[in-house]
Image (cartoon, rainbow, N blue to C red):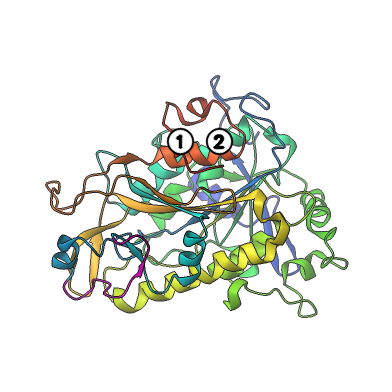
Amino acid sequence: MTEPLSRRDFLGRLGAGSAAVAGGYLLATWEWTGPASAGAPRPGELADPSPGRTLVVVELAGGNDGFNTVVPHADPAYHASRPTLGVTDPIDLDGQVGLHPKLPKLAARYHAGQVAIVEGLGYTPPNLSHFASLAVWWTADHPSTGIGWLGTYLDGTVGYDDPLAAIAVGGQPAPALLGQRSFATTITDASGLQPRLPAWAGTPEALLASWAHLAPSRVDARQLVGQVERAVGLSARARTSLGQVLGGDTAAPARAAGGVAGQGTVGESLALAARLIGSPLAPRVVYVTGVGDFDVHEGEATRQPTLLSELDDGIDGLFTDLGDAAGRVLVMTTSEFGRRPAENGSGTDHGTANTQFLIGPRVKGGRYGEPPSLTNLDATRNVVPTVDFRSLYATGLSWLGVQDTAAALGGHFNAVPALT
């Protein structure tokens, strides 16, 4: 294990350590900066390390507006709260709610029984700061420890033996993957050699604070790249080099899922996820970060539809690319909070409870949880959460073969009964 790093040392080593560039993509491993606590699970204690399934987490950072994503169009309070920003033409699902019109492919999957909508997710007392709330979501409400909820899963399954068991796709490390006895691996395009500051982040100091426990690991970069080559290079489309597999070589460009072009979009990230999952050595977790700025304080009427359209295309492209392997995959969306019910000019302010999706062929489609009241608001004029967000995590961990999810989450939370 590495010794704890100062902030200056950490900055000096970003993009170095065990990072390696292949085919225009940066591959890096990260690890815990301090000694593992006595309570950290050991490999094999939580679940079979090879369940044959993959959980894909799509982080909609910035705070996606759940009310304009899953629209409560039958509720007069919704229209009263949003006289100009309310969605007037949602794709109806059941006479009560509908999906934003930019989500037609997701709506089709819902009607096919492959989308679970989980409403009212949140925690109390709420924190409306981006990074503070993200830290709650990353750590399953243990931000002071810095241990990610999926990092705990990795600790208790593969440990250090498989650095590719979980891969974050995006422009920055994923604190949710940080464990005390395992690696957090990231893949990004070469422009991610230095961290990108999200548009909603505010200051570089806030971003650095979110990585306080992360440091580049000492894994041999050549060995790690070799593992990736074996993982994705065995597929029919990957007979030449890692760069061609991942789309960094012009001779074999990656097809952005659903036709969404450009690196850094959710389509590109999910197209890469499909390539990794489709290999014989599929990761157990793919964590997609940095796919858009969902902090819609202004210009929401044009900004959120674009983001949701990209999400719709990306998810559809992922399952299309996976083909017969789609049954091994569960997609989960997360976001640090939702938006306030009432509009504020051309946008909406930070909110509390939100709606998330579980998507895949093994999902029992429908609505789960309890929709929060739009009239019985808290003192800040926000809705009151009705479902602890860790119930969503318990569902994802159950998908990965964890029977005792309380050990991974630090308490018992009922999984959403949305899996077959």
Q: Which residues are magenta?
A: 83-95
Q: Which of the numbered marks, if any, corresponds to residue 94?
A: none
Instruction: Where is residue 189? Give x, y as percent.
Output: 64, 67
The residue that disc 1 covers is 415
The residue that disc 2 covers is 398
Instruction: Where is residue 217? Give x, y as percent.
Output: 66, 43
Instruction: Where is residue 191? Give x, y as percent.
Output: 60, 70
Q: Main secondary structure of the magenta part?
A: loop
Question: Is residue 211 something that shows in the picture?
Answer: yes
Mark 1 or 2, nearer chain start? 2
Label 2 sits on a secondary structure element that is helix
Between residues 180 and 99, which one lies in front from this camera angle? 99
Instruction: Say whether residue 236 is left or right of residue 357.
Output: right
On screen, 145 above or below 175?
above
On screen, 194 above or below 10?
below
Label 1 sits on a secondary structure element that is loop
Q: As shown in the figure, which amino acid type bears the numbered disc 1? A: Ala
Who's the residue at 34% across and 54% down the image?
130
Instruction: Where is residue 152? Give x, y as percent.
Output: 55, 33
* Residues packed near mark 2 inside 10 Å, few (<14), some (14 to 19) or many (20 plus): some
Instruction: Say whether residue 58 is left or right of residue 344.
Output: right
Quarter where residue 298 is shown: bottom left
Q: As shown in the figure, which amino acid type bears the numbered disc 2? A: Ser
The residue sitting at the top extreme is: 38
Q: Quadrant of the C terminus?
A: top right
Asked if marks 1 and 2 touch (Cβ < 8 Å), the reply is: yes
On screen, 209 above or below 391?
below
Q: Tag count in the figure?
A: 2
Judge whether residue 88 is colored magenta. yes
Question: Is residue 334 something that shows in the picture?
Answer: no
